[in-house]
Each structure stands twice: as structure tokens, then as C-alpha cells.
Image (cartoon, rainbow, N blue to C red):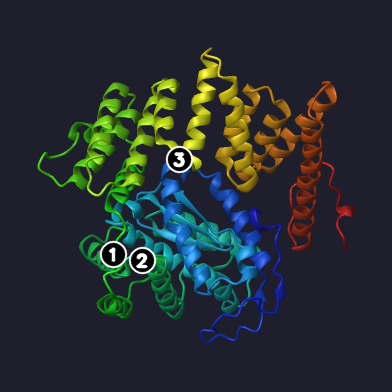
């Protein structure tokens, strides 16, 4: 973890965003760019962690909640132009059973699957995201680091990673080791915001929640649920409350706001029920647990539609993970028939069940049948999840000897467009590498492999793949000149990043590992 942040040094300038001072003498601030770079560096480590989860369906749902909150925060004036341009505004998932969410520098917000599994509605879930988003828009991490005597970025980055890891553990010794290891015990509270910051995040988060169209009562309901759960079962499964202590004052203010708010715009209930069950399945894939969900089938016949639909969905996904594909197909089809009976109809929930059916058919080795379902989704087939699934289906058809060159080429071009707009999407880069290679675009495939490795934190691996691309371009006639030029430029850029990291580490008093082609004399004095 200490090696993580050697590339960064604190840059102090006058504050770039007009924020209430909360009482601290904030005459100086960490730059927005430095905060974003810190967040990117931490994220590269998190993406390489086995608990990092790239589930396209759940991520689509997470973004369907998070991005409207970001838009509402912009409209409310909480995100100024420079902050908007510099920060990522990117949520991500961790395959963890504990109830937790946390903000990182630069606009990244992490969510444990246990949080989605606990929440009963999208309004409750959105209330937590709105609170975390407010920590980002108000730059509480940077501002609390100022209050902590402006510790170095190295200590801050190491501590952030350590506390993220500790929050995923129920062992207090892990947290203590993270703090000591980072040599930054003086800022242990980096993720444990002050009471003033918590109150500010509650207040701004509540306004953001309401402006985004969610029921404001969701925040009070979530607070009540957390309070009750931790009083009944203080087993360490709620690390969210370690970094966001739920005081009597916060509870009272949330209840008061709920009393004086209107009914709010209640979000459709079925989609959250599906994503709640998906989270419960994916956060614990023990075969015995999955088999129990399959055996439960559609639950009690007299149960409400929401519960029956969720039970069918969980059973179908569990059966697919157990490779019981025929049973998974039958259960997913029953879930689809059930969601189509909902009144009023909920197109997004219906679409999510259809995507489950696609997932089951792809896992069963039935790409043509999977494409048939994707074609019935129609205009709602837009989005990352259908994009990746369609590409996988076209790839499976080609690998199975059932030529689908047009479909494969179309998926490759669609993925290329997607990664141009979402360059941090390692999963899309990986899929692009596979489809481009199968379609005969060899240089594009090599470059996509390099980008996937870079986003996942393997800079050396990315450089190796780019060098392989250079060699392939020189050794074969007729290669794409434009793609070869992109590879050359990208290699120079990553090599320059390596050189800056090496030199910054030395300037910070560290002893970085040697890097091929980088000499001490290359570093400015």
C-alpha cells in the first residue's frame, strides 16, 4: 500500500470551490486534480482486488440511482464547473456481505452488496448514495486532511486503502494494522468524518434525494433500519456505522425532515426487489446456499408478487451458477411471466428479468437463443449490460463454428464507441479485445488488452502489451496505420507516467524499484 501513492505529492493552492468552512481555517486546499489522481490510483488497486465486482446488471442499476443524484446535485449548485470536469462521478461494487458504502477522493463511491441486500426500496438505497455523494461534492476527505495537519498524499493514499480493507473486515486488528502500516495514525479519522461533516452530508444529501425524485422518507427509513439492526445484532456486520456514526441527533433530524416532507415520488418497487435478490445471491455463492435458494423456488404461492418474483429471480440465478441450466431456464421464464403480470407494468423490471434469461442461455452455451431474447428487448437493449451480452453471444457463435461476421464486427464497433466514452471500463476493454481478435482486428485487440490491464492497475503489463503491438505492426504488412499510431502514442504516455512516478517517489525520500529505461539522472533536481 505504501508503494501505491509514491507518485503523488501534495499540491497546495487557494481553494478552488466555494464551500462552507465548517469552522476550520481552510485557507489552503488540495487541488482538484491532485485529489482526482489520488482517487484514480486507489481505484486501480481496488479494481485488482478479488472482491471488486463488475456485474453489468447490478452496475446498471447502481448507476440508474447514482447518476440522477449527480444530476440533481448539479442542478442544486453543489457541483461547480471545475469540480464537475475534474471528478469521475463513478460508483463501483464490492462483493462483500457487510453493510457499507464509502466515498473516495475524486468522485468514486464504493458500495458493498450487503447494503443493497439490506435496503427494501430504491429510496432507502438512494438515501445512502446521496449522503456519500455529498461527502464528495463537499470534498470532505480533502478538507478533513487539511484539519489533520495536511498529511502527505502517500500517507493519505495508504491509509485510505487500509481503511477500505479494514471496513470489509470484522476484525479490529486489521484496522489497527492498516493505520500503523501507513504511518498515519494521526489521520485515522480520514473516513470517519466529523459530526459537522456528517450533518452537512445529511442535509445536502436529503435535498439531493428529493430533487432527484426519490421519496425523502427513504433517509429516515434507512436510519431507522440501521439503528434497529445494530441494536439487535451488533456483530460487526455494519462497518458503515463505524465510519458514519448514527447519533441521536442525526436520527432526530432525519425523522423531523420526513414528518414535514410530502409523500414524495415513490420509485417502482419491483426492480429494486430483483437487484436486492441478485446482490444476495452474488455476495455468497457457496453451493449449499445457492442450492437452498433453488429449492425454495418461487416461494409461497400466496405471497405478494414482489416476494414471489424475487424468489424466482434468486432461484434462477442460483441454478445458473450451479450449472443447472434447464432448471434455471424454467425458473427465469416463470419470473418473466410473473413480472409481465404486474399492474402497472414496470418495463425496467421486465428488462432485468429478460437480461437474466439471456445470462442463463449464454452460460448454457445457447448464444443464438440468447440473441433472440436480446432482440425482443428492442429499444431497451441499449446500455452496458446488453452491449456486453450481445458481444459475448456473437463471439460464442463464431467460436462454435456458426459464422456471424457481421454481428461480430458490429459488436466490435459498438464496444469501440463505448470505451471511447468510458475509458476506465476494464470489462468492456477485455470484451473488445476478444471480439476484435476474432474479427481479425489484431492491433485493436492488443491495444484493448493493454488498456484493460492499465485500468486494472497493471501498468507494466499494459506496457508489455503495447510493445507487443508495436512489434506486430512492424512485422506484418497491411496493419492498420491509425491503430499503430495510437499504440505508439499510448506507449509513450504510459512510459512518461512511469518516469514521473519513479521521480516523484525519489523526491519523496523513497527507494522505488528500478524501471527499465529510467535513470536517476532523468529526474529533475
Disc 1 + disc 2, Cβ < 8 Å:
yes
In the image shown, does 334 or 94 lie closer to the viewer?
A: 334
SS of the residue under disc 3: helix
Examine the image and state in which quarter residue 241 appears: bottom left
Give coordinates of residue 374: x percent, y percent. 43, 31
- Relative side of 256 to 130, left or right: left
What crowding class fits label 3: few (fewer than 14 Cα within 10 Å), some (14-19), or many (20 or more)? few
Q: Is residue 175 visible?
A: no
Name the residue rendered at 13%, 45% in the picture.
303
Examine the image and state in which quarter residue 287 appears: top left
SS of the residue under disc 1: helix
Disc 3 + disc 1, Cβ < 8 Å:
no
C-alpha gap between disc 1 and disc 2 = 8 Å
Nearest-to-viewer mark from 2 and 3: 3
Q: Earlier in the sequence, mark 2 or mark 3?
A: 2
SS of the residue under disc 2: helix
Q: Quadrant of the N terminus?
A: bottom right
In the image shown, does 56 or 233 lie closer to the viewer?
A: 56
Q: Which labelled disc corresponds to residue 226?
A: 1
Q: Earlier in the sequence, mark 1 or mark 2?
A: 1
Give coordinates of residue 74: x percent, y percent. 53, 69
C-alpha gap between disc 2 and disc 3 = 41 Å
Residue 282 drawn above or below residue 241: above
Residue 365 drawn above or below residue 495: above
Nearest-to-viewer mark from 1 and 2: 1
Residue picked out by circle 3: 379
Q: Earlier in the sequence, mark 3 or mark 1?
A: 1
- Relative side of 181 to 197, left or right: right
Nearest-to-viewer mark from 3 and 1: 3
Amino acid at each position: 500500500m505504501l508503494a501505491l501513492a509514491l507518485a503523488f505529492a501534495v499540491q497546495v493552492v487557494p481553494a478552488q470551490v466555494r464551500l462552507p468552512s465548517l469552522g476550520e481555517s481552510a485557507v489552503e486546499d488540495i487541488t482538484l486534480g491532485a485529489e482526482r489522481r489520488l482517487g484514480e490510483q486507489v481505484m486501480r488497486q481496488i479494481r485488482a482486488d478479488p472482491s471488486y465486482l463488475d456485474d453489468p446488471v447490478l452496475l446498471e442499476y447502481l448507476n440508474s440511482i447514482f447518476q440522477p443524484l449527480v444530476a440533481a446535485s448539479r442542478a442544486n449548485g453543489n457541483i461547480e464547473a471545475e469540480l464537475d470536469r475534474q471528478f469521475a462521478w463513478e460508483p463501483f461494487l464490492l462483493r462483500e456481505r457487510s453493510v457499507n458504502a464509502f466515498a473516495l477522493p475524486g468522485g468514486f463511491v464504493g458500495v458493498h452488496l450487503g447494503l443493497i441486500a439490506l435496503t427494501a426500496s430504491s429510496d432507502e438505497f438512494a438515501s445512502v448514495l446521496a449522503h456519500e455523494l455529498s461527502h464528495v461534492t463537499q470534498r470532505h476527505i480533502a478538507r478533513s486532511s487539511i484539519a489533520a495537519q495536511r498529511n502527505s498524499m502517500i500517507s493519505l493514499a495508504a491509509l485510505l486503502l487500509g481503511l477500505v480493507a479494514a471496513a470489509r473486515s470484522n476484525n479490529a486488528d486489521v484496522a489497527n494494522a492498516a493505520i500503523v502500516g501507513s504511518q498515519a495514525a494521526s489521520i485515522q479519522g480520514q473516513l470517519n468524518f466529523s459530526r459537522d461533516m456528517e450533518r452537512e452530508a445529511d442535509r445536502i444529501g436529503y435535498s439531493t434525494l428529493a430533487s432527484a425524485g426519490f421519496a425523502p422518507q427513504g433517509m429516515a427509513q434507512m436510519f431507522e433500519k440501521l439503528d434497529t439492526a445494530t441494536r439487535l445484532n451488533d456483530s460487526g456486520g455494519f462497518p458503515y456505522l463505524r465510519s458514519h456514526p448514527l447519533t441521536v441527533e442525526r436520527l432526530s433530524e432525519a425523522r423531523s425532515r420526513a414528518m414535514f416532507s410530502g409523500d414524495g415520488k415513490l420509485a417502482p418497487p419491483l426492480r429494486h426487489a430483483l437487484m436486492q435478490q441478485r446482490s444476495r445471491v452474488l455476495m455468497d455463492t457457496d453451493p449449499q446456499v445457492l442450492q437452498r435458494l433453488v429449492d425454495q423456488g418461487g416461494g409461497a404461492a400466496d405471497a405478494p408478487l414482489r416476494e414471489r418474483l424475487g424468489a424466482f429471480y434468486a432461484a434462477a440465478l442460483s441454478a445458473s451458477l450451479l450449472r443447472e441450466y434447464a432448471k434455471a431456464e424454467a425458473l427465469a421464464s416463470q419470473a418473466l411471466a410473473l413480472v409481465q403480470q404486474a399492474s402497472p407494468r414496470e418495463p425496467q423490471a421486465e428488462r432485468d428479468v429478460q437480461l437474466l434469461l439471456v445470462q442463463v442461455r449464454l452460460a448454457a452455451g445457447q448464444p443464438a437463443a440468447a440473441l433472440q431474447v436480446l432482440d425482443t428487448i428492442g429499444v431497451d437493449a441499449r446500455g452496458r449490460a446488453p452491449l456486453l451480452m450481445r458481444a459475448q453471444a456473437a463471439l460464442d457463435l463464431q467460436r462454435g463454428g456458426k459464422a456471424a461476421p457481421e454481428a461480430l464486427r458490429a459488436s466490435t464497433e459498438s464496444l469501440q464507441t463505448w470505451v471511447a466514452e468510458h475509458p476506465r471500463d476494464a470489462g468492456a476493454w477485455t470484451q473488445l479485445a476478444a471480439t476484435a481478435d476474432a474479427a481479425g482486428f489484431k492491433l485493436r485487440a492488443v491495444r484493448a488488452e493493454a488498456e484493460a490491464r492499465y485500468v486494472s492497475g497493471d501498468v507494466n503489463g499494459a506496457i508489455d502489451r503495447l510493445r507487443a503491438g508495436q512489434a506486430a505492426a512492424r512485422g506484418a504488412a497491411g496493419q492498420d496505420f491509425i491503430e499503430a499510431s495510437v499504440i505508439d502514442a499510448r506507449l509513450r504516455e504510459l512510459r512518461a507516467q512511469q518516469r514521473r512516478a519513479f521521480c516523484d517517489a525519489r523526491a519523496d525520500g523513497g527507494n522505488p524499484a528500478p524501471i527499465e529505461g529510467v535513470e536517476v539522472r532523468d529526474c529533475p533536481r
